[in-house]
Amino acid sequence: MFSGGRRGFRPNEPMFQRGDIKYLILDLLKDKNRHGYEIIRELEERSFGFYSPSPGIVYPTLQWLEEMGYVSSVEQDGKKIYTITDSGTKFHEENKSQRIGFGKPPFSGWDHVSGFEFQDTMQALRDIGRMLAQSARTLSLDKLKKINMIVKRTFEEITEIIRKPDLRNNQ
């Protein structure tokens, strides 16, 4: 999915090198003007859920890009909408070798996996995490214990599914 200096993604390693996000953001802005959360969602979508940058990464990068003159912004409906500038387009083109692109999932041998099915699964997991985080202060201990049991049982079921040989895909 992401090309550049890496050959595939390794767990517990960053997917990108420090500063690579600026190339991804400029890549998105050359297609369409966007606000910050739209950039976050689009990066997540294009990476099939493998990468979801935090606002703490995206907004400072956007600010830096703006300070460098590579993007400009206008306030619209209470949101800052970012646009790539001519200078940003030039910087983007001059740094082709540094750019990271979107394509297939970053794991070799995943051609049989539907990126969109995987993305939907990852989104469902993020939705559960988000809902739990938003509800944490109001959950009773009893409800939290029930949720914990469901999550542990679900984890065990998923682990069993993953470890069970799939004869149709074994070639």
Image (cartoon, grey):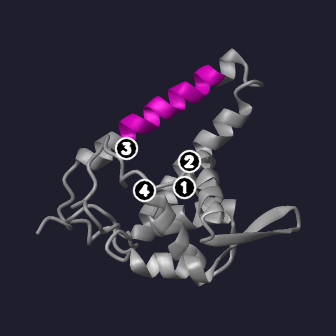
Whichever of callouts 1 and 4 sits on the residue coming sooner in the sequence is 4
The secondary element bearing badge 1 is classed as helix
Q: Which residue is mark 1?
A: 123
Find out whether residue 101 is within the magenta segment. no
The residue lying at 52 percent from left, 64 percent from top is: 43
Foreground mark, 1 or 3, reads 1
For residue 159, side relative to residue 58 (left or right): left
The residue lying at 63 percent from left, 49 percent from top is: 55
Foreground mark, 1 or 4, reads 4
The residue lying at 50 percent from left, 63 percent from top is: 22
Check the picture and name the quadrant holding the C terminus.
bottom left
Can you say whether 163 is above or below 155 in the image? below
Foreground mark, 2 or 3, reads 2
Foreground mark, 2 or 4, reads 4
Whichever of callouts 3 and 4 sits on the residue coming sooner in the sequence is 4
Between 20 and 150, the one lying in front of the other is 20
- Packing grade of label 1 (10 A; few <14, some 14-19, many >=20) is some
The secondary element bearing badge 2 is classed as helix
- Packing grade of label 3 (10 A; few <14, some 14-19, many >=20) is few
Q: What range is drawn magenta here?
A: 144-157
Q: Which residue is mark 4?
A: 50
Q: Which residue is mark 2?
A: 126
The quarter of the picture where residue 155 lies is top left
Q: Magenta region, mostly helix, strand or loop?
A: helix
Q: CA distance from mark 1 to mark 3?
A: 16 Å
- The dot on residue 158 is 3
- Residue 42 position, x and y percent, is 57, 67
Can you say whether 66 is above or below 138 in the image? below
